[in-house]
Image: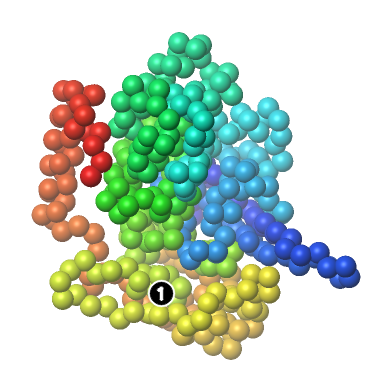
Amino acid sequence: MMDGRDLILETRALRRRFVTRKPLFGPPVEVRAVDGIDLRVRRGETFAIVGESGCGKSTLARMLVRLIDPSEGAIRFENRDITRLEGAELREMRRHLQFIFQDPFASLNPRMTVGALLEEPLRAHGIGTPEERRARVAELLGRVGLLPQHASRYPHEFSGGQRQRIGIARALAVSPKVLIGDEPVSALDVSIQAQVVNLLQDLKEEFALTLIIIAHDLAVIRHMADRVGVMYLGQLVEVAPADQLFTRPRHPYTEALLSAIPVPRVGAKRAARALEGDPPNPIDPPSGCRFHPRCPYATELCRTTVPELAIGADGASVACHRAQELTLEGLAAEGGGRSPDAEKRFALYRARRSEREGANPSSPSQLTEI
């Protein structure tokens, strides 16, 4: 069991419904985007939420920072219910919970300079004098691998990866405790994704942050997350430590997601667990387990009875009637993770990079995107 003192963010029976149509007669037609989420995030961890597009994970992320208000349920931050906060109390809470948006090309105001974008949250919260805010902007740009003189430039003058760095710097401006990233690398080139992921990991260690990362690609968070929650059709179906989830999945949907990850080794093969059909309509979800129409292991019990998200002896939680009897395939056969030689090379690279940054913090070599 998780010690309550370790919790920094928690949700209880969280739901969000969107009305899609209001007929003249009869009740309104609703989409249950998030439907009964119980989530517990530990202080200092990286918690990833994964699932197919449309499963509700981005809606959940926005609810955690009150960009979207829940229809039902509660959100607790540091054991305080923040679900109904308004005005000054809500603004103060948002100092501690900051959001990184998915699209770096749409999330920055094109009419504002980078310096003005980074100063804006400081002014909104009444932090510092004008001189102190300008110094803070220069510091933040350096922390994310940009130069202080970039403060006078506009967002269109930067690449996608650099814009996302600016978005991260803006989120860090007010010294938050939790950073929530809504697919923060999905709009970037693959070569730039690794740089942003590494940056987030470095900043987490430096500022003692808690990270909540939304992703639809498990390969992105495989070496980043401490724990992973898997969402399907508005509900959590599995929550487990990352290494355990990747090597020993307990839910058939998790197994199917893992089978889509490419095998990074010549000659290595793994049987794909292709899912039949599309996810059911969230307006009218199926009875019983919501995954049963696409599950190759479904029984009559799955079709009629809703499984509970139950905690097992290994500490993982799974919503599957057959979790105890199924042996599902993970990534252990592929020797998930980097090889020992690769780990040595990465460690050497990081050590050399630290030496360069210590000798010359503004060296352009550390600012170039591959």
Q: Which quadrant is the C terminus positioned in?
A: top left
State the residue in front, 297 or 259.
Answer: 259
Q: Using the rendered image of the protein, determine whether residue 5 is visible from the camera's viewpoint.
A: no
Residue at image location 38% in from the left, 79% down from the top: 273
Residue at label 1?
A: 256
Instruction: Identify which residue is drawn at 44% across, 61% down.
Output: 216
The residue nearer to you, when weighing 273 against 24, is 24
Q: Quadrant of residue 250?
A: bottom left
In the rendered structure, the answer to whether residue 83 lies left or right of residue 175 reads right
Q: Quadrant of residue 71?
A: bottom right
Q: Residue at x 58, y 18 (%)?
A: 126
Q: Position of residue 148 (x, y in %)?
A: 34, 22
Secondary element type, mark 1: helix
Q: Relative to 154, is 41 above or below?
A: below
- Which three-letter amino acid code belongs to the residue tagged 1? Ala
The spot of residue 73 in percent (x, y) is 69, 53
Residue lying at the far bottom in this picture: please name it. 300
Tell me if I can see residue 339 in this picture.
yes
Position in image of residue 323 (x %, y %): 46, 76
Q: Residue at x 24, y 24 (%)?
A: 362
